[in-house]
Image (tube, rainbow, N blue to C red):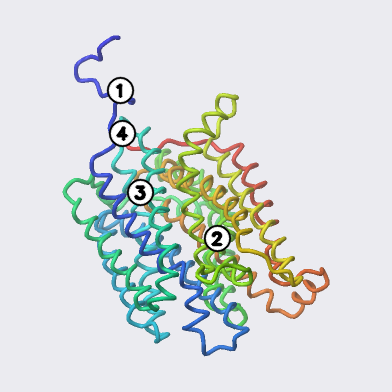
Amino acid sequence: MSTPPAGASAAPAEANIPAQIPYIIGNEGCERFSFYGMRNILTVFLVSSLLMHLPEADRPGAAKDVFHTFVIGVYFFPLLGGWLADRFWGKYHTIFWLSLLYCVGQLCLALFVDNRTGFYTGLCLIALGSGGIKPCVSAFVGDQFDQTNKHRAKVVFDAFYWIINFGSFFASLLMPIFLKQLGPAIAFGVPGALMFVATAVLWLGRKRYVMVPPAPPNPDSFLNVSRTALASGRPGLGLATAGTVAALASFLLVPAFGFVIAACTALVAIIAFGGVGVWLQLDGARARHPAEAVEGVRAVLRVLVLYFLVTPFWSLFDQKASTWVLQADAMSKPEWFQSSQMQALNPLLVMLLIPLNNLVLYPTLKRFGYEMTALRRMTAGIVFSGLSWVVVGGMQVVLDGGHPFTIVWQVLPYALLTLGEVLVSATGLEFAYSQAPQAMKGAVMSFWLLSVTVGNLWVLVVNAAVKNAAVTNFIASTGFGVTAFQMFFFAAFAFAAALAFGLVARNYRVADHYRKA
């Protein structure tokens, strides 16, 4: 065996995982226990306690609206967190200060279980804190790697995702019991305590981290290049103007659909119309910006197309904590078992599937000549999510026919949905980081997380639509109940998205934006 020349970098196979990674993963495990601990009992708590002032028939729908509005906030505020990290505070300080705000929000939930204003204030603070740190934590993990050990990053991102689900599993298993036996103050207080622990663990590793400084004001930033492109000709500028008009017009929806739907629709209009306008005129920015910056914007816009096509997956995935829990209430189960505890299946299966896929499935497929690339995994994941909703739709038809059956049958859709999650979400974390130019990693990760906001927007829109008499009359004519019809609709939505995603992915050129050694 030949000896490397003096001064040569370590061979990739010998590169170590950075010693500071355990602090970040420990922080994430506690934070995820905190988040999922409160999230997975939220729907049940709202129906059984906080929304008791509403007629009984209206509580499930109102609980779903509150839950998905909260999730929209959680995945909207990454835009703010990514911007603060990239331009002002850096990733570590953004995570630390917003984590303290997050702690205050968790404290509000424990203190105000009988006060809607106080409780909703806590949800807002958690959405701001949890959402704000999301793009920073996963990007912060990536910052600890360079070209010499980037091949270790996939292992760490998988471990990162595994610890998320480790925390989620115990939170999903224990918090419903705490809620029933110890009351909501304790059930929300325990996740709050774990959030304080998470913040302390992060702080303990502060002297070990690789701190990539925030980018200085950049005349060739994404926004500046985009602005120049739009100003260079009519088609793009016209589309951006149309997007602004559509965004303003969206607020006319407030009386019928509420502020959240209107605001999210406005955001989608601005990004969609503006993005297409920039794409059409991007060459017009070459006179004022270097080719590297222009191509960087083009790369980001191409990624955003994929992100948008992932949004239907999130509309299916996040309803396991709302629609599926409410379905489970109608199933037979042991007296001691709570419907929301079924959610513990999801993280448990994730912890099993990640090593199974990496150690068995992917190598086996590769030996047969089929490489499971990131984009192929994500396409398959969206398909599996759709299949899970075909199953729950079929179960709902049986329940609507007056034939109750055991909650054990929910294991099948959970297995399908979780396989889809591993293929889409765990893959997407590393993919999003690798595709982001260095100066925009936090922001691009924010757009990845923003896809979850848009996914939950689809849920609110569908829930609002079925309150319309014409829509409910049409559903009645199909012979399905409203809930079953919605389930089959979301399944079809996912299959259409998977087809579009697969077609776009065939022509996508994968980039490599890990920092140099």
Q: x and y percent of residue 68 in the render?
A: 52, 69
Q: Earlier in the sequence, mark 1 or mark 4?
A: 1
The local crowd at label 2, few if under 14, some if 14 to 19, many if 20 or more residues have their Cα within 10 Å, is many
Question: Where is 404 relative to 298, above or below?
Answer: below
> What is the distance, in whole Å, between disc 1 and disc 4 at their CAs?
15 Å
Q: Earlier in the sequence, mark 3 or mark 4?
A: 3
Residue that numbered label 3 is attached to = 139
> What is the distance, in whole Å, between disc 4 and disc 2 at their CAs?
36 Å
Residue that numbered label 1 is attached to = 11
Q: Earlier in the sequence, mark 2 or mark 1?
A: 1
Q: Type of residue at label 4?
A: Lys
Residue that numbered label 2 is attached to = 240
> What is the distance, in whole Å, between disc 2 and disc 1 at their CAs?
49 Å
Q: In the picture, which quadrant includes the C terminus?
A: top left
> What is the distance, in whole Å, between disc 1 and disc 3 at their CAs?
24 Å
Question: Where is 25 relative to 146, above or below?
Answer: below
Q: Type of residue at label 2?
A: Ala
Q: x and y percent of residue 151 in the render?
A: 37, 32
